[in-house]
Amino acid sequence: MGESVFNIFVIGVSINGYGIARGAVGRGYLVALAEMNDFASGTSSGSTKLIHGGLSYIEHFEFRLVREALMEREVLWEMVQHISWPICFALHIKKEAAERPLKSFLRKAFEYPHGWVDVSEQSARRQFSGNRL
């Protein structure tokens, strides 16, 4: 760092620290980052790296949060298209869970854009290799 002068010094570069730093840089501030280990070496390194639309909020009928998550996903997508891409995956839902009232809503949520395929676990295992299921 030498003689450099920074407006903001962020200690701990988790997803929150990174977000603060990125937001500040986007507003013209000079930012220095400090992390005890490698950047994103904590919980971020153990995540799935999936960018989703807040599907976990649907279960609790938190539709405002789903909308907010989808809007943020679009903002993020615009920023990282060069290192992010859509993936397809099978989601096995046990019969008991599929018969809950939320089934029809979730079915509609998954219909777009890749379609809903109602398959058994055995059928899914035949269609996807073990490392993809």
Image (cartoon, grey):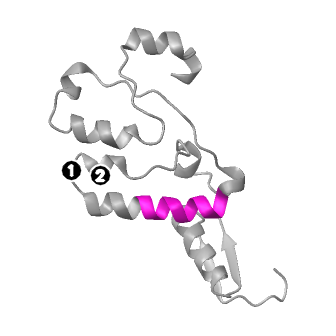
Residue at 44% across, 64% down: 71
Q: Are marks 2 and 1 in contact (CB under 8 Å)?
A: yes
Q: Label 1: few (<14), some or many (≥20) within 10 Å?
A: few
Residue identified by numbered label 2: 57
Q: In the displayed image of the protein, which residue is found farthest to the left?
A: 101
Give, as a three-letter code, the residue at label 1.
His
Where, by quadrant of the figure, is residue 40 drawn?
A: bottom right
Query: Split into 4 quadrants, where in the image is the N terminus?
Result: bottom right
Magenta residue span: 70-80
Residue identified by numbered label 1: 60
Q: Label 2: few (<14), some or many (≥20) within 10 Å?
A: some
Give, as a three-letter code, the residue at label 2.
Tyr
Position above or below: 26 against 64: below
Q: Is 91 positioned to the left or the right of 34 in the image? A: left
Where, by quadrant of the figure, is residue 98 drawn?
A: top left
Residue at 38% across, 52% down: 54
Magenta stretch mostly in which secondary structure? helix
Q: Position of residue 83 (x, y in %)?
A: 70, 51
Position above or below: 88 against 31: above
Q: Indicate yes or no whether the magenta region holds residue 78.
A: yes
Of residues 97 and 40, the one nearer the viewer is: 97
Q: Indicate yes or no whether the magenta region holds residue 21.
A: no
Q: Is 69 positioned to the left or the right of 21 in the image? A: left
- Residue 84 visible in the snapshot: yes
Q: Position of residue 43 (x, y in %)?
A: 52, 50
- Residue 36 visible in the snapshot: no
Position above or below: 124 against 2: above
Q: Position of residue 9 (x, y in %)?
A: 63, 81
Q: Position of residue 124 (x, y in %)?
A: 45, 15
